[in-house]
């Protein structure tokens, strides 16, 4: 194999794919990136950890066909260190020379034949989704995905299309977040899937490129995420150079919990709270709370909500907030960290907090009626 790629092209390819390579796997090939000639003018660059894969077809000058795999992290760092201009990649036996001007690296590789097959997008019906909408849904819910791999049904985000409504729900058993967005664009969405947490974080990273839309499709228990990546900006009257990129993730084959049953329907106390005052109060009193539970107490009385923490090994702290509370006095405990994370994704300066009893979940809503956060109470 003998090819040249511009540094911008090679670096884009590696930045989009190297993150998927499994650096901790006992299979050395999974920490490698596949570089394989696609045709006379392009090269395929791909990585996989067997559950996730990323691949793209990138423009290149091809002088000699072939394929090789190389350590993904090492290649990424080498390409970043190179000066601007073309980079030559040439195989010599089991090693590869990566050259730019007088700078030369020789890297040991593994045979491309040993690289696992990447899922193909043949026979998939893709639908388009607005990038801003998809990114917003992930931003509002990703933080409450469970990291407990022994509970796969909540180790991802439940993503659903129901007519013209897109819905994403996540939970870790202590809190739940849900966002529903009405989609005005043409086309109806009808699907239901659980996207693994690692895939959610990778998709969030890939959505930062600024395209207006991305394409999604499913096949044989996998989600296909497809987009065009701009590699180099137009020069004079020439068009932009772009590449086709596909990210694939196995979906979680489990049933997501019945989230509607977790969201309380008959909470009889509703108060409006200045969001930033509550966040600052929580950040203050969490300094006193237990490092394990982050427990704080909300003490509600007429017109006031006092946020406090009492840690026998450290001391006490409290901050009052004026609110429109007009019911019987009530004390309710929460994990302050959970509350801060929910509040942190809301854009409103005032939030709605619905309560019932001291042992009942609390519901936090935005003013647009799109977002719901449920936080379970804890004993203080």
Image (cartoon, rainbow, N blue to C red):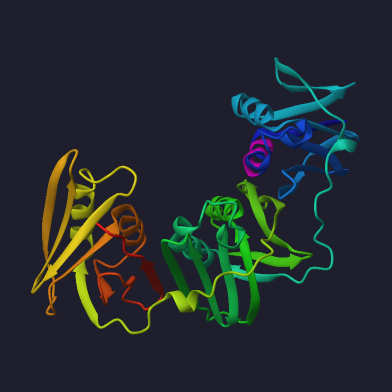
Viewer-closest of 59 and 115? 115
Residue 158 lies, in percent from the top left, at 57, 67
For the stretch drawn in magenta, the main secondary structure is helix
Is residue 5 located in the magenta-colored stretch of the structure? no
Q: Is residue 365 above or below residue 290?
A: below
- The residue located at (80%, 50%) in the rendering is 118
* Quarter occupied by the C terminus: bottom left
- The residue located at (47%, 64%) in the rendering is 136
Residue 309 lies, in percent from the top left, at 18, 51
Q: Is residue 49 above or below residue 177?
A: above
- Residue 198 horizontal side relative to residue 103, left or right: left
Quarter of the image for residue 58 reads top right
Residue 72 lies, in percent from the top left, at 69, 33
Viewer-closest of 215 and 139? 139
- The residue located at (86%, 25%) in the rendering is 91
Q: Residue furthest top?
A: 102
- The residue located at (60%, 24%) in the rendering is 81
* Quarter occupied by the N terminus: top right
Residue 211, visible in the rendered structure: no
Query: Which range is magenta?
Result: 10-16
- Residue 119 horizontal side relative to residue 199, left or right: right
Residue 336 lies, in percent from the top left, at 29, 54
- Residue 201 horizontal side relative to residue 250, left or right: left
Q: How many marks?
A: 0
Viewer-closest of 63 and 251? 251
Is residue 15 located in the magenta-colored stretch of the structure? yes
Quarter of the image for residue 338 reads bottom left
Residue 95, visible in the rendered structure: yes
């Amino acid at each position: 194999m003998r090819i040249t790629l511009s540094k911008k092209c090679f670096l884009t390819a590696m930045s989009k794919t190297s993150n998927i390579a499994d650096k901790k796997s006992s299979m050395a090939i999974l920490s490698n990136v596949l570089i394989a000639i696609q045709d006379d003018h392009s090269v395929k660059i791909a990585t996989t950890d067997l559950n996730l894969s990323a691949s793209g077809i990138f423009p290149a000058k091809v002088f000699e066909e072939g394929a090789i795999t190389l350590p993904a992290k090492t290649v990424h760092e080498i390409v970043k260190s190179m000066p601007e201009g073309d980079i030559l990649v040439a195989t010599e036996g089991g090693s590869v020379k990566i050259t730019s001007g007088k700078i030369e690296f020789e890297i040991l590789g593994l045979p491309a034949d040993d690289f696992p097959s990447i899922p193909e997008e043949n026979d998939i019906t893709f639908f388009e989704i607005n990038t801003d909408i998809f990114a917003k849904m992930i931003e509002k819910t990703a933080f409450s995905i469970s990291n407990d791999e022994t509970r796969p049904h909540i180790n991802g985000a439940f993503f659903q299309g129901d007519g013209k409504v897109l819905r994403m729900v996540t939970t870790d058993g202590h809190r739940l977040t849900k966002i529903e967005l009405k989609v005005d664009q043409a086309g109806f969405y009808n699907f239901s899937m659980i996207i693994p947490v690692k895939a959610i974080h990778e998709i969030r990273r890939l959505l930062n490129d600024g395209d207006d839309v991305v394409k999604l499709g499913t096949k044989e228990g996998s989600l296909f995420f497809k987009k065009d990546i701009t590699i180099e900006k137009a020069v004079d009257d020439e068009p932009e150079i772009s590449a086709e990129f596909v990210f694939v993730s196995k979906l979680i084959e489990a049933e997501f919990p019945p989230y509607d049953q977790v969201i309380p329907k008959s909470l009889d106390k509703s108060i409006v709270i200045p969001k930033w005052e509550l966040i600052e109060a929580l950040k203050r009193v969490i300094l006193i709370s237990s490092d394990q539970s982050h427990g704080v107490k909300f003490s509600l009385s007429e017109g006031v909500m006092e946020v406090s923490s009492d840690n026998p090994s450290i001391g006490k702290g409290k901050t009052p907030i004026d609110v429109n509370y007009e019911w019987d006095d009530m004390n309710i405990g929460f994990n302050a960290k959970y509350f801060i994370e929910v509040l942190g994704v809301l854009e409103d300066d005032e939030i709605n907090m619905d309560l019932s009893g001291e042992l009942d979940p609390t519901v936090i809503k935005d003013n647009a009626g799109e977002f719901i956060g449920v936080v379970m109470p804890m004993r203080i």
